[in-house]
Image (cartoon, rainbow, N blue to C red):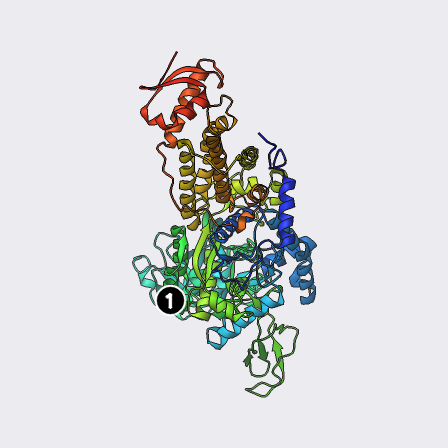
Amino acid sequence: MAEPKLKGKKWTIEDEIKITEEWKKNKEYKFNKDSKKEVFSIDTPPPYVNMPIHIGHATVYTMQDMIARYKRMKGYNVLNPLGLDRNGLPIEVAAEKKYGVKLTELTREKAIYYCKKVLEDSSNLSINSFIRLGISFNSFEVGNNIGDAYFTDSDLYRTLTQETFIDLWKKGLIYEDERINNWDPLLQTTIADSEIEYKEIESDFNDIVFKCKETNEELIIGTTRPELISSCGMVIYNPEDERYKHLEGKTAILPLYNKEVPIKAHPMAKKDKGTGLVMMCSAGDLSDIRFFREQGLKPIISINQDGTMNKNAGPLEGLKVREARKKIIELLDKENLFRGKRKVLHRVPISDRSGAEIEFISMKEYYLKQVDFLEELKKIENKLKFFAPQSKKIFDDWVNSVSIDWPISRRRYYGTEIPVWHCNNCGYIYVPEKGKYYKPWKEPCPLKECPKCKSKDWKGETKIFDTWFDSASSPLHILGYRTDKEFFAKNKPCSLRPQGKEIVRTWLYYTLLKEYLLLGEPIFKHVWIHNHVVDSKGYKMSKRKGNGIDPLEILDKYGTEPFRLWAVTEGNIIYDDLRCSFDRIEGAGKTIIKLWNVARFISSFEQSSNEYDLREIDKWIISEIDNLCEFSDKSYNNYDFHVPAIQIKHFLWDTLSSHYLEIAKKRIYDNKNQFSEKEKNAAVFTLNYVLRKLLKLWAPVIPIITYKIYKDLYHEKIHSLEFPKVEKKTKSKITTKDIEEINAFVWKFKKDNNMSLKSPIEELYLQEKYKPIIKDLKALHEINKIEFGELKVKK
């Protein structure tokens, strides 16, 4: 036994850092757009960098990296860019929180200054985390370095977003209109339906007295939104409710406001809810909005953009919504128009961005047409292959729920500006030509004179795009839609879109919609949808909830490779959530240590010549690793790394280490001169054959240690090698089950009889099937004589 070629008695975190820094310095995974290989492109999700990435990000980006590394070994030219999302509300919220300011109270220049300031450090922290994780990001747009990234707030990216708007506008697919929209009163901006969550919140259900004009009878109506009485446009009852049929066509008088509204039968009213009478307000909730559209009623909005009541609310003007709710009950009670209240659970729309309760306010916004194209989107969706297939239902459900066009404008500061100028004289809208990044809020209109009225008085648009309109440009950007049209034409659509299930209705949907409207075809081939990484209590990790864990803390404590191995063996994230467990991450480190020790042990032996005679036991382990290669290849190709990783781990610990390694070293050491030189060489050959393939199988999963071992032992860079395939299957007359059964039997016998594993056995009876490996069994278990028959030890 010689000195191990693999130096270092143990694998260390310092080894990991040294190698990942080497990759960064050497641009190890540089993308070559001139390569003749087929491109496999991954539209990786650009994470927000308002804070460093948390452990959930680290887990799913690591898994996406496994896909990239596998495809690279399968001969693809892998485009795996890192994008950092630096636009939109999360950046503004982070700036407000960090610097204790409210951006809506600042000048635009000052607000943008604070946003850029908060981005400086967080972007570098995110990039450093990805480097430590060993993720092989690359791009042909930037420096081709794993430490480089594209930013969604760069002039290049924002120009692309503006140009997609210009193209869609010229196609007649974008328009400006005044409509009732979802309004986040905390963030002071419109948000899309896809950015709304619903929560059951305990509310007061108030019984209020209305009057029927014609009969002068009291009409008791229950509502959770009494502050919106001034916005009531109709009172309804269920057509089958006998109590109120006599009211059809009559008139209700609103309490306090003395406004008259019609009374009609409508199925939206439920006989068993409240008193059965319902006041329909202009914008109490989404059902109210739909009702007003259906009935052709003119909406009356009583809430300002800042969340206070406006002049339509009369005595409530200037009050915040909750204050107004309390105040109107006091006024009603004073006039004997209040009949009591009770607690109910009320389904309330909540902003996914801020957690604030949504209000509904009428204002001008820009809209991208989507309602007219839902059937086409369903056809596009059916052309995609979803992993896992059940995640397709999330997309289906969302498409089936869409009822209005997408409001793409936002009244905030830090985002891509909408490239539009308005003529102050006649209202003409000017959309410029493509070719540069426009900032209409601070730049003069490129058109000197209005073509409609000849006025020279222009006002630049101050609104920005919804961040999802920006993010929906990502596959266009990474494939060079505006910067390398030849590359784009050759390599579209994107090979893979990996993303979380919670943004199926936003990022996936909006990207497919936008690119369909631009190109008329799907922009992806495959979609990989993952579940969540949750904390120890089972809650989804998020920055807003404050339960995210900085992955650098875990990497500093346990190392990258244990974390990567844990991520893939803990569970299959496309089917279930993964619960973060430090103990299990630490436990995965034992397998990393095992791999290092096994490789180091194997590196201690060399063949004395190239001549060898494979024994049956060698053929068995070779067939086992070959079968594992075939299985892993098929699974990896379907983006399943979990099941193979479990089997590879079992192979390392049990099949290889517990069984074959013990058998092989007896032959290599050969203390009793039982084996020929060719037989010893066969054991060394087989060990290295198995190790090479084992390292390649695990190279996409734990790339740093496999890179180190392969380079030191075999002097090649493993990630540039071909994924192992089986050209000719080795057949074995023995099975793993056979090996496990006989070894377990002998080891148990020795344990039960207080014998050491080295203690000799005089005579062993075993089945005929073990005949091909008798010589190896005798050496392993120190058996003097073997006979055939029922399995037993003759004492």
Above or below residue 457? Residue 323 is above
Above/below status of 665 relative to 709: above
Q: Is residue 206 above or below residue 524?
A: above
Looking at the picture, how far across and down is residue 654, in whole percent? 46, 31
Q: Quadrant of the C terminus?
A: top left
Q: Would you name the residue on which mark 1 appears?
A: 376
Q: Quadrant of residue 377?
A: bottom left
User: Which residue is rendered at x = 46% and y = 59% of the image?
Assistant: 495
Left or right, 52 with respect to 509, comes to right
Q: Residues within 10 Å of mark 1 (few under 14, many from 20)?
A: some
Q: Residue at x 49, y 38 (%)?
A: 610
Q: Amino acid at mark 1?
A: Glu
Q: Quadrant of residue 478?
A: bottom right
Q: Is residue 672 left or right of residue 551?
A: left
Residue 78 coordinates in the image, percent (x, y):
51, 57
Q: Is residue 245 left or right of residue 604?
A: left
